[in-house]
Amino acid sequence: MSDRPARLLWVFFLAYFTFGMMYVLGALTPDIIAEYHLSRFGAGFLGAAFYLAYTLCSMPTGLLMDRVGARPIILLGVALMSVSCLVVSQAHAYMLILAMVFAVGVGVTMLQTSGNPLIQQLDRPENYHRNLTITIAFAGFGPFFAPFVLTYIRSTGRPWQRLYLFFAVVCLLVLILLAVSRFPQRATAGAEGIRVEQLGRLLANPIILTYALGIFFYVAAEVGTAFWIPKFFEDVHGVPAAVANPHATTLVAKAFPSLPAFIFALFWGMQGVGRLVAGAILNKLGSRRVLRVYSVLALVALLVAIFGSKNLAAVGFAACGFFTSVMFTLIFSGTINTFRENQGTISGLLCTAVLGGALIPPLEGLMGDHFGMRAAMLIPALCFAYVVGLAMLGRAKYE
């Protein structure tokens, strides 16, 4: 145990919480649309830029990590996050903001791709799944916390860009803590890395293909739901999507977001809660059954949010966040558990499949421009429907 720097695990909790805050883009969308006179389609590229970085950089990061180890990749990723957030805090051109959001996504990809396997080496091996679940739960609490900071900034009359100055400072703090921390010797993703020459053969495997599509459609559904929550409330229920109350006088009122922004925050917060309690539920019901139940309930919750009243929409979106909590990890782990070879390459393929999160927000925006946000939200509902089908009929091995 002495050669396992367990204290570094606490730094990773903070690091994942920090990059989780970057998912606040959905709460910023109404301000950005108004400031730059964007269509919903144009605004959707904010979410696309962030997740496109995951798609393009996951496998190259894995390959590079196998060569140089996790520590330099993680430090470079957090440094890139800090610098990019600093640029956004001073930027006024939408295209520059879009480019920096992509750069933030690259940094987050570098941190997460290197950090997930590294966590196994920071504590006893039997604690890996628990520690990884807790760490990823912190990533869920980040976007719950960020709208409160944004609300306070906006209620004091400052522009939304100042939120990214706060992000830059926190990233710099994380970078310093990581730089002075002791890492395991030559920590990498493990003995087996990504094998580019195996990609074509693996993609021809029906289990890998269908579960990679499961990741694609799950991430599309998650991002497509959360990103457009504020605009959905504004367009469908007539609730102003501005995050702050301009007439707030007390500190609590200045820090508490509007209903659309709060439900956006609650979606992610409930996802974090769901991850924390997932262990007990999985132990009792089993992975396959939980995936089936949660995928159905996530779809039902979203449909309630789409077609229900304002109050039902609030409950539905929050519940949908909770039921998404285990989907990614169960789809991912089920695929990896099915194969004893090429796990590193399969992992890279699954990470690349988060492309769904890049494609769906602009598509929803285009649908919203022409047919309204209620019709647009049917797109993530269809994506959840694929996950339901996969959960019911998929042949991955769990138990």
Image: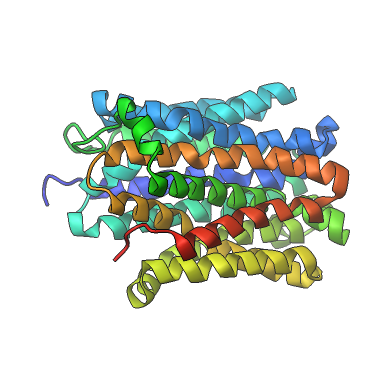
User: 52 or 202: nearer the eye?
Assistant: 202
Answer left or right for 136 relative to 39: left
Answer left or right for 65 relative to 349: left
Q: Residue at x 30, y 49 (%)?
A: 9
Counting labels gives 0
Furthest-left residue in view? 2
Q: Residue at x 44, y 70 (%)?
A: 290
Q: Examine the rendering and report whether any part of residue 347 can be seen.
A: yes
Residue 182 in the image: above or below residue 88: below
- Coordinates of residue 38 in the picture (x, y in percent): 82, 33
Q: Residue at x 86, y 53 (%)?
A: 235
Residue 208 in the image: above or below residue 60: below
Q: Examine the rendering and report whether any part of residue 254 can be seen.
A: no
- Coordinates of residue 45 in the picture (x, y in percent): 69, 33
- Coordinates of residue 242 in the picture (x, y in percent): 80, 50
Furthest-bottom residue in view? 284
Q: Quadrant of residue 61?
A: top left
Answer left or right for 389 relative to 398: right
- Coordinates of residue 167 in the picture (x, y in percent): 55, 38
Q: Quadrant of residue 239?
A: bottom right
Quadrant housing the C terminus: bottom left
Q: Residue at x 68, y 42 (%)?
A: 361
The coloring applied to the image is rainbow
Residue 58 in the image: above or below residue 213: above
User: 235 or 245: nearer the eye?
Assistant: 235
